Amino acid sequence: MNMHPHPTPPPDSVPLIDNPFTPEIFATGISGLSVINGIVCITVESARCDHTKAQPAMERVVVGRLALSVPAAQGLLAGLFDFMGQHGINPLVTNGTVTCQ
């Protein structure tokens, strides 16, 4: 069996094609993290209320899963840390409060 090296081209050498039809995911939290076969998996959730009920209860609904290679997960972590710091947000502190109105 011929083994080929894993392709890791420099990010700037590969053109980015922006797709305006890519779905957006809104998440209010992270419900799970795992590493499966070297892939970092992030499960995101959204807090939602069923307003068809007289007393709507808050529910956590899984809205998506993101699977990243380790270098991509490291890039996401570093990028978020830098981005939040540049905007005056401490990335290491959370109040964890979710409200339903």
Image (cartoon, grey):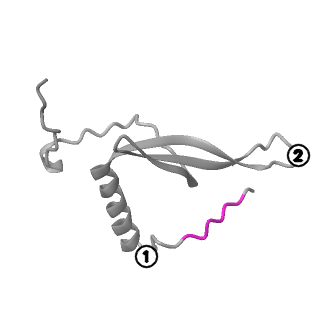
Assess whether residue 25 is covered by the magenta stretch.
no
Which badge, 2 or 1, comes first in the chain's sequence? 2
Residue range highlighted in magenta: 94-99
Question: Front-most of 43 and 49?
Answer: 43
Crowd band around label 1 with a 10 angstrom C-alpha radius: few (<14), some (14–19), many (20+): few
Q: Main secondary structure of the magenta part?
A: loop
Q: In the rendered view, does 34 fall on the left or right side of 55?
A: left
**Label 1 secondary element:** loop
The residue that label 1 is drawn on is 88
Compared to 98, does 89 lie above or below? Answer: below
The residue that label 2 is drawn on is 54
- Seen at 81% across and 48% down, the residue is 56
Residue type at mark 1: give it: Gly
Residue type at mark 2: give it: Ala
Q: CA distance from mark 2 to mark 1?
A: 40 Å
Numbered tag placed on residue 22 in the rendering? none
Question: Front-most of 39 and 83?
Answer: 39
- Seen at 55% across and 70% down, the residue is 94
Residue farthest toward the front in the current orientation of the protein = 1
Question: Front-most of 67 and 45?
Answer: 67
